[in-house]
Image (cartoon, rainbow, N blue to C red):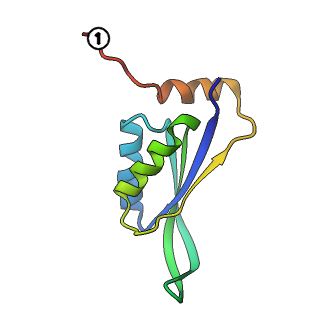
Amino acid sequence: MERAVLVYTTWPSIVEAEKAGRNLVERRLTACVNILPGMISHYRWQGAIERAEEVVMIIKTRASLAEPVRAAVKEMHSYATPAIAVIPIESVDKTYLEWLLAETAVLVKAA
């Protein structure tokens, strides 16, 4: 059976994160996204130490969709180098996994 993964990413605003999250769900690339506002980031960028207020997004999807999710995030993101980390899940509740797989299944339209 296919495994589930989490994709961790950050966004510059809740508006941008919500727009992207909804798009990912609509496209069935994810079963669910969690958007957590209020994060403060300190990082080095182009030789300077920066501080930014960001939003965390946790994307719950199947392992086989990790690369399409990564591509979609890059396509929608305003950052030149967005944080995108695919995290394998060691264990997941069976009924939750079944739901996640069902929600990310490709729909076949009847002819």
Foreground pick, 38 / 30 = 30
Foreground pick, 11 / 90 = 90
Label 1 crowd bin: few (<14), some (14–19), many (20+), radius 10 Å: few
In the picture shown, does residue 73 fall above or below 2?
A: below
Q: Is 63 positioned to the left or the right of 104 in the image?
A: right
Picture coordinates of residue 9, whole percent (x, y): 52, 58
Picture coordinates of residue 81, whole percent (x, y): 46, 68
In the picture, the quarter occupied by the N terminus is: top right
Picture coordinates of residue 34, whole percent (x, y): 53, 49
* Residue type highlighted by circle 1: Ala
Residue in the picture at 39% in, 49% down = 72
Image quadrant assignment for residue 24: top left
Foreground pick, 76 / 99 = 76
In the picture shown, does residue 17 fall above or below 96?
A: below
Residue at the disc numbered 1: 110
Numbered disc total: 1
Residue in the picture at 48% in, 30% down = 104
Image quadrant assignment for residue 25: top left
In the picture, the quarter occupied by the C terminus is: top left
Residue in the picture at 40% in, 69% down = 80
